[in-house]
Image: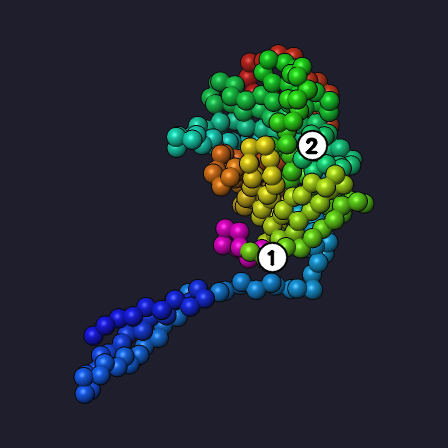
C-alpha cells in the first residue's frame, strides 16, 4: 500500500493508492480524494465598484462628514513598544492631539498640528510635537528643519480624509485578506504623486490597512477593534499595529477619543518637560 500526495493550484489532494500485481505490471488505483484547502474569497468581489465608490463607502462607515472634517482629534490609551531583541516596553499613558489642516497635497508631509506624549509610569518616554511649522521634542524646538522629514515615517493615514479632493486619484487594486477578513484595496495618489495603499473590510467598510513607503522602509498599519460612543457617528480603531518592512514596531491601544476639541497653540509648542501627563 502506498500513499501519493498531489498539490494542484493550491488545492491539496490526497489519494490513497493500492498496488496490484497483475502479470508483473504495477497499477495505481486511486480510492479516495479529499479537498482540504480552497481558494475561498480569492476572487475580485463586486468588480463594478471603482476606487472612488469604495472610498465613499469607507467615509460613510467611519462617520461621514464628522470623519472627513473632524477639525481636531484627541486619542488616549497605551502603547506597546517592541524592541529588535524581542523585548517589550509598555507606555501605560499614551496620547495624541491632532488639529487637521483643511487641505493636503502631500499625504506624507507634516501638516496641521500634532502632539504625541507617552509615559512609562512616572517617566516621560516620548514627547514630540509639530506646531504647523516647527518640530519639537523633550529638548524644545528642533532647529534643524530636516527634522520635519521624520514625520514622513508617520503621516499617511490622514490621506483617507482627503482622498476625494480635487487632484487626487483613487485606483482599485487586487482584493486580498487582512487579518483573515476579505478586503477591498484602493491606492490613493495625492497631488504630489505620492501613493498610499488602503484596505477596507468588505462587510463593514471599516479601514483595516494602510501601507506606504518611508525612509525606514515599507510601513504598514493594521486597524481593528473598532468602537464608538453613544450619539457619535465616529468609529475609532481600538487597536493599531505598526510594521516596518514586515516587522511590528509598536501597537497602540486606544481606549478613548474626543473630536472637535479646541486646543490652544501652546499645546503644540514645547518649551519645557512636563512633570506629569498632560491628559
Residue 230 pos. (x, y %) = 64, 44
Q: CA distance from mark 1 to mark 2?
A: 27 Å
Q: Foreground: 83 or 234?
A: 83
Residue 57 pos. (x, y %) = 69, 54
**Residue lying farthest bottom?**
23
Bin the neighbour count of mark 2 within 10 Å (Cα to Cα): few under 14, some 14-19, many 20 and up. Answer: some
Q: Which residue is mark 2?
A: 109
Whether residue 169 is situated above or below residue 1 in the rendered picture? above
Magenta region includes residue 181: yes
Q: Which residue is mark 1?
A: 174
Q: Is residue 26 visible?
A: yes
Q: In what quadrant of the picture does the N terminus appear?
A: bottom left
Q: Secondary structure at mark 1?
A: strand
Q: Mark 2 or mark 1, which is nearer the start of the sequence?
A: 2
Identify the image quadrant of residue 25. bottom left
**Residue lying farthest right?**
166
Bin the neighbour count of mark 1 within 10 Å (Cα to Cα): few under 14, some 14-19, many 20 and up. Answer: few
Q: Foreground: 142 or 270?
A: 142
Amino acid at each position: 500500500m502506498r500513499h501519493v500526495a498531489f498539490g494542484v493550484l493550491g488545492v491539496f489532494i490526497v489519494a490513497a493508492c493500492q498496488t496490484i500485481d497483475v502479470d508483473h505490471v504495477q497499477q495505481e488505483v486511486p480510492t479516495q480524494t479529499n479537498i482540504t484547502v480552497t481558494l475561498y474569497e480569492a476572487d475580485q468581489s463586486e468588480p463594478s465598484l471603482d476606487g472612488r465608490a469604495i472610498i465613499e463607502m469607507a467615509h460613510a462607515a467611519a462617520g461621514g462628514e464628522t470623519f472627513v472634517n473632524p477639525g481636531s482629534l484627541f486619542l488616549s490609551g497605551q502603547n506597546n513598544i517592541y524592541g529588535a531583541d524581542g523585548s517589550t516596553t509598555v507606555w501605560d499613558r499614551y496620547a495624541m492631539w491632532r488639529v487637521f489642516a483643511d487641505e493636503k497635497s502631500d499625504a506624507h508631509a507634516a501638516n496641521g498640528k500634532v502632539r504625541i506624549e507617552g509615559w512609562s509610569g512616572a517617566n516621560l518616554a516620548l514627547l514630540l510635537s509639530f506646531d504647523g511649522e516647527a518640530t519639537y521634542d523633550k529638548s524644545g524646538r528642533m532647529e534643524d528643519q530636516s527634522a520635519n522629514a521624520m514625520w514622513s515615517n508617520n503621516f499617511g493615514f490622514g490621506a483617507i480624509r482627503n482622498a476625494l479632493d480635487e487632484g487626487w486619484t483613487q485606483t482599485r487594486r487586487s482584493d486580498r485578506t487582512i487579518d483573515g477578513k476579505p478586503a477591498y484595496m484602493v491606492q490613493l495618489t495625492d497631488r504630489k504623486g505620492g501613493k498610499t495603499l488602503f484596505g477596507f473590510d468588505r462587510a463593514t467598510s471599516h479601514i483595516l490597512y494602510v501601507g506606504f513607503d518611508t525612509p525606514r522602509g515599507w510601513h504598514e498599519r493594521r486597524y481593528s477593534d473598532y468602537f464608538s460612543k453613544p450619539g457619535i457617528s465616529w468609529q475609532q480603531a481600538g487597536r493599531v499595529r505598526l510594521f516596518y518592512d514586515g516587522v511590528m514596531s509598536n501597537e497602540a491601544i486606544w481606549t478613548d477619543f474626543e473630536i472637535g476639541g479646541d486646543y490652544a497653540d501652546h499645546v503644540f509648542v514645547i518649551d519645557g518637560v512636563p512633570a506629569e501627563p498632560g491628559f
